[in-house]
Image: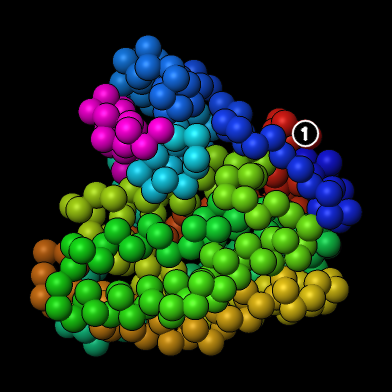
Amino acid sequence: MQQLIDQADRGTTTFPREPWAFAARGPLSRALMDALTGSGSDRVDDVVEGAGQAVAEAGDVLRDDDVQLSLFLLYASAYGSIPACDPRLEWDVRLLAARRVLEDAFEAALRDLVVVDALPERSPVAVASALFALTSSDSGPSLSRHVAKKATREQALEFLIQRSIYTLHEADPHSWAIPRLNGRAKAALVEIQADEYGGGRPERMHAEIFAKAMRGAGLDDRYGGYVDAVPAITLCSLNMMSMFGLNRRLLGAIVGHLAAFEMTSSIPNRFYGDGLRRLGFGDDVTDYFDEHVEADAVHEQIAGRDLAGALAEDQPETLPEIMFGARACLTVDGLVGAHILEAWEQGRSSLRTTAAGA
């Protein structure tokens, strides 16, 4: 991946455009990439059996390249985020069956990993307090502090590449919850998402501000341009959000995820902005992070009390899932941060060395 970093410094990063900007990582993702274009209809029948085989052969579902890229591809079909995905296949029952096989294994792995403590009372104040306590006690490695004080310019570019997998479509996974909520919780989520989408100003959409940061750093701002570069655990973080958002039975989990996500955003983004300034990046790159310092300080209050707390009070059965989603957010994002920091501490790239162009 050094070639990509060097190209970014020169502002000359280029990628093939069609049909895919990235390569398969195993038999299942290869079959899906053929099937999802609509040109490999004979491969669609292979994917259900292939999904079961991929799960059976995965030593660690969360870090398995073929499983996580395959989930990313299937979710991309639902989002419409990758142009190569034929929209006519979004609801193909065979692809949905394959997705269910992968999701069952993925969710089981998450529930084995994520430990949920005793539940708070089902009131907005108690739920918000429990979520703030949970996020403030998180003692995982601090990627933001490293970027602020120690990161090299090359590492800062890697950080932006890692973040691009979610952030170029920021807020979309959580928006799946809007039609599934009612009353206070729906109003709270819409209030948060309105800010995420720029409050009616397309140039202030958070995804667009991040795209500007990518361009300012000399990186490709096309969604999916760096899928080849990132490890499976980075795809896992986005796939978890997508699974929570797209499955109505996991409504509480996507709400809890958003609450934890917002509660752990404001201060880290201040550190990220400071680190990028230290390395000489301009306002076009730091604007995204500066925007989130203030915005997420407000969002965390709304997400904790008016969204998660109101949902728990109005639909008590969602409380265990709210706390699970919050804990899962901290756990998986902690794994991503640990992967990146471990690589940097060992003097190597956090990106995939087997990616094309490495």
- Callout 1, which amino acid? Gly
Which residue bears the numbered disc 1?
A: 357
What number of labels is visible?
1
Q: Nearer the viewer, residue 118 or 2?
A: 2
Measuring from the top left, give residue 182's x and y in whole percent.
15, 72
- Which quadrant is home to the C terminus? top right
Quadrant of the image occupied by residue 300:
bottom left
**Residue 135: in sight, yes or no?**
no
In the image: residue 271, left or right of residue 115: right
Measuring from the top left, give residue 217's x and y in whole percent.
77, 62
Magenta: main secondary structure: helix
Question: Which region shows up in magenta?
Answer: 86-107
Tell me the residue at 29%/59% (across/down). Answer: 176
- Which quadrant is home to the N terminus? top right
Tell me the residue at 83%/62% (across/down). Answer: 153
* Residue 87 among those drawn in magenta: yes
Dot 1 alpha-carbon crowd within 10 angstroms: few under 14, some 14 to 19, many 20 or more: few
In the image: residue 3, left or right of residue 232: right
Tell me the residue at 50%/40% (across/down). Answer: 83
Q: Secondary structure at mark 1?
A: loop
Measuring from the top left, give residue 329's x and y in whole percent.
42, 60
